[in-house]
Amino acid sequence: MSNGKEISLPVKEFYSRSKKDLKLKSCFGVLGFEKIIRGHCISKNRNTVLVLGKSFVMKLKELEKGQRRQAVRGRIKKDTCCIILPDGMKFFPELEEAVREKEIALFHSSLSSRRCRQILQETFLPFKSREKIVSGGLLKIYEQGVMITGDSGIGKSESALELLSRGHYFISDDVVKVSIDSRGGLIGRAPEVIQNSMEIRGLGIINIKEIFGPNKICPKANIDLVILLKKWRRGQEYDRLGLKFPEDHSILGRKISRIIIPVAPGRNIATLIEVACKVHILRKKGFHAPQELIRKVDRSLSKI
């Protein structure tokens, strides 16, 4: 699929992966679906996925038929594998003639050309780089891969150490090696040089395997949730009811739910992380406590 630097993706698979986000609709069935998108999808010099901007199409309308045909053919390069017409624009005869002759897939999109290009960059980012070192620790908590991030000195390792003492599993401390698996999910593991190791201020480097035993070491895990530990600041507003759903955290173009936990003296961060994991599990099952409370209040008010 990828050599780590450039993509190699059939147009058929591109359409299947991107039609929802890009709101794509094929103009001519499966025409051009067998072509392979290679290289970088959109750049100044390469246009394997070509987005025809509205300004370009408007200029074409001012040209004579022969000039339009020439302009369209000049815009389509040798490595163009598919074309997107954004802003809900309809295809015109000269474009249909060119794509049928060259067997290039043509798609409609209701999105703007700028938004299409932005999503394309996000879509193909994983194929440009399928591996990344991310700052943070990774534990397996209640069968979920949980990445704990935050500023240096915020208490990530200390919280992880307490979570380990409560029976959860260790994968990595300080940095996580993240890659994309065959199904498109994110896998996290420890870089070889720091496997089984954790740094605790005042204690130095400790070996988790020797202290807690080999059964508490997990070599890798899917990353299901990111928890950001953030220093509590006086006067800053925080979501007290939990009405907002977790934010999205992007790694290698994949979006992972992220929960922010304010850190302040007296707060047991390990307990809050455990509860955050359980809340996340319940939300995935469809249970949302604040919304349930609102429904109860509404029912009570309707009886008054």
Image (tube, grey):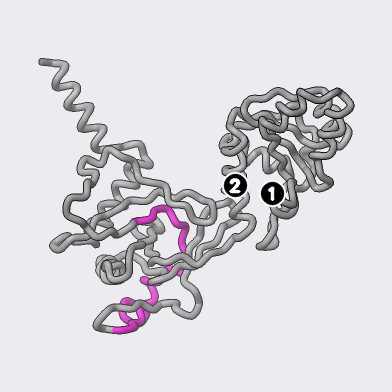
- Residue at image position (81%, 44%) is 77
Total number of numbered labels?
Answer: 2
Residue holding disc 2: 123
Q: What amino acid does circle 2 point to?
A: Thr
- Spot occupied by residue 105 in the image (x, y as percentages of width and height): 77, 35
Residue projecting furthest to the front: 62
Task: Identify which residue, 146 or 77, lies in the foreground.
Answer: 77
Task: Identify which residue, 103 or 163, lies in the foreground.
Answer: 103
Q: Residues within 10 Å of mark 1 (few under 14, many from 20)?
A: many
- Residue at image position (63%, 25%) is 88
Drawn side of residue 118 relative to residue 292, left or right: right
Drawn side of residue 300 relative to residue 28, left or right: left
Q: What amino acid does circle 1 point to?
A: Cys
Quadrant into which the C terminus falls: top left
Quadrant into which the N terminus falls: bottom right
- Residue at image position (85%, 32%) is 98
Q: Marks 2 and 1: CB-CB under 8 Å? A: yes
Is residue 95 found inside the magenta-colored segment of the image? no
Residue holding disc 1: 41
Task: Identify which residue, 235 or 103, lies in the foreground.
Answer: 235
Of pointers 2 and 1, the one earlier in the residue sequence: 1
Q: Secondary structure at mark 1?
A: loop
Is residue 215 found inside the magenta-colored segment of the image? yes
- Spot occupied by residue 285 in the image (x, y as percentages of width and height): 36, 40
Drawn side of residue 298 relative to residue 137, left or right: left
- Spot occupied by residue 176 in the image (x, y as percentages of width and height): 45, 67
**On the image, which quarter does residue 100 sit in?**
top right
Q: From the image, state whether disc 2 or disc 1 is nearer to you.
A: 1
Which stretch is magenta? 204-227
